[in-house]
């Protein structure tokens, strides 16, 4: 089994809150493709640097466990 961990931003770059239905849609798509998800109810804080500017994010963590079958691993690691 392989675990993928996705960190989804809670806010757009301009500070607006991302619509809750987008998280539901993402979860539904992951369940269809991978059969199950696990989502934390805590907010994850992230910090990163880009061109000498420090950015801070608030994120939702979603975990997806998939069997080690090659087709599932390839579809999760290849952007759509």
Image (cartoon, helix red, strand yellow):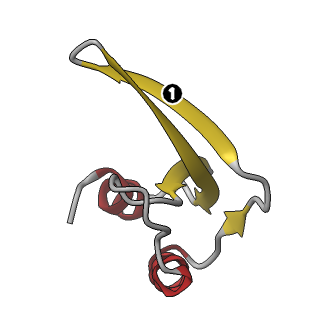
Vertical order, 63 against 35 (above or below): above
Which residue is painted at 62% across and 57% down in the image? 60
Q: Position of residue 34 (x, y in %)?
A: 51, 73
**Exactly how many numbered labels are in the figure?**
1
Q: Residues within 10 Å of mark 1 (few under 14, many from 20)?
A: few
Q: Indicate the position of residue 61 as horizontal and vertical percent values.
A: 63, 54
Q: Residue furthest right?
A: 41
Mark yes or no: residue 4 visible: no
- Label 1: which secondary element: strand
Quadrant for residue 76, please give it. Answer: bottom left
* Residue drawn at the location 75% of the way across and 59% of the way down: 40
Query: Residue at the front extreme?
Result: 15
Left or right of 70, for residue 42: right
Q: Is residue 72 above or below residue 3?
A: below
The residue that appears at 51% across and 42% down in the rendered structure is: 57
Task: Give the position of the C terminus as an image quadrant.
Answer: bottom left
Q: Quadrant of residue 48?
A: top left
Along the horizontal axis of the image, is 20 left or right of 70? right
Q: Residue furthest top?
A: 52
Residue visible at 27% across and 12% down in the picture: 52
> Which image quadrant is residue 16 in?
bottom left
Instruction: Give the residue at mark 1.
Output: 47
Looking at the image, can residue 50 be seen?
A: yes
Left or right relative to 79: residue 43 = right
Depth order, front residue of 44/61? 44
Measuring from the top left, give residue 74's x and y in whole percent.
31, 55
């Amino acid at each position: 089994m392989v675990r993928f961990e996705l960190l989804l931003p809670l806010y757009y770059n301009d500070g607006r809150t991302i619509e809750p239905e987008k998280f539901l849609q993402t979860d539904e798509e992951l369940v269809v493709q991978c059969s199950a998800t696990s989502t934390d109810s805590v907010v994850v804080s992230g910090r990163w640097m880009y061109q000498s500017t420090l950015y801070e994010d608030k994120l939702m963590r979603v975990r997806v466990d998939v069997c080690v079958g090659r087709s599932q691993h390839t579809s999760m690691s290849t952007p759509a």
